[in-house]
Amino acid sequence: MADVTNVRTSRNGSEPSTTELVQRAAEQVSRLVRDELMLARAELTQKGKHAGIGIGLLAGGGALAFFGLGALITAAILLLALVLPAWAAALIVAAGVFLLAGVFALVGKQQVARAVPPVPQATVRSLRADVDVVSAAVKDGRRA
């Protein structure tokens, strides 16, 4: 961005022509857009790696929790089977599990509806700073 504020003279030693200034501005905007896209790509790649590792760990934890839940359900059925027939104990516990699953599904659906798309925040901040610098340079150029 330093090129925007630096005034270079043209080849013949005088002030640069409008054509040269427009050409420089086009080159600088092009470079700026490429740099910002590279920053966004790098930031999203890094976030994607962290998300992948996190999802893998969550899946592993979920699988272990699934087996633990199965053991707890079996224990509840066996506990109820002491006072009820085994089939009745299994039916009561299954109804409770389905009720809990329905509650989880409704809460999960509400959370997904609230989700926002991921935004490369550093890139957005950088773009805003670039726009501010260019705007300030243009305003300074008008005053000169």
Image: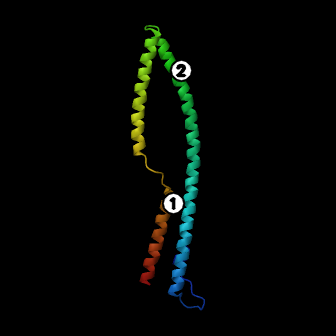
Query: Residue under circle 2?
Result: 71
**Res 100 → quadrant:** top left
Residue positioned most to the right:
11
Which residue is at a point 40% across and 36% down the rendered structure image? 107
Query: Residue under circle 1?
Result: 123
Residue type indicated by callout 2: Ala
Neighbourhood count class around disc 2 (C-alpha, 10 Å): few under 14, some 14–19, many 20 upward: few
CA gap between label 2 and label 1 equals: 48 Å
- Compared to 143, does 32 lie above or below? above
Mark 1 lies on a secondary structure that is helix
- Compared to 90, does 105 lie above or below? below
What percent of the width, then of the height, locates residue 51?
55, 45
- Compared to 30, does 56 lie above or below? above
Q: Nearer the viewer, mark 2 or mark 1?
A: 2
Which residue is at a point 45% across and 74% down the rendered structure image? 136
Are the residues flagged by discs 2 and 1 in contact, CB closer than 8 Å?
no
Q: Is residue 43 visible?
A: yes
What percent of the width, then of the height, locates residue 58?
55, 37
Which residue is at a point 52% across and 22% down the rendered structure image? 70
Mark 2 lies on a secondary structure that is helix
Residue type indicated by callout 1: Thr
Quarter placement of the C terminus: bottom left
Tell how many labels. Answer: 2
**Res 36 → quadrant:** bottom right
Reading the chain from its start, which is encountered first: label 2 or label 1? 2
What percent of the width, then of the height, locates residue 45?
58, 53
Neighbourhood count class around disc 1 (C-alpha, 10 Å): few under 14, some 14–19, many 20 upward: many
Q: Nearer the viewer, residue 102 or 59?
A: 102
What percent of the width, then of the height, locates residue 66?
53, 27
Q: Is residue 6 visible?
A: no
**Mark linked to residue 134:** none
Which residue is at a point 54% across and 59% down the rendered structure image? 40
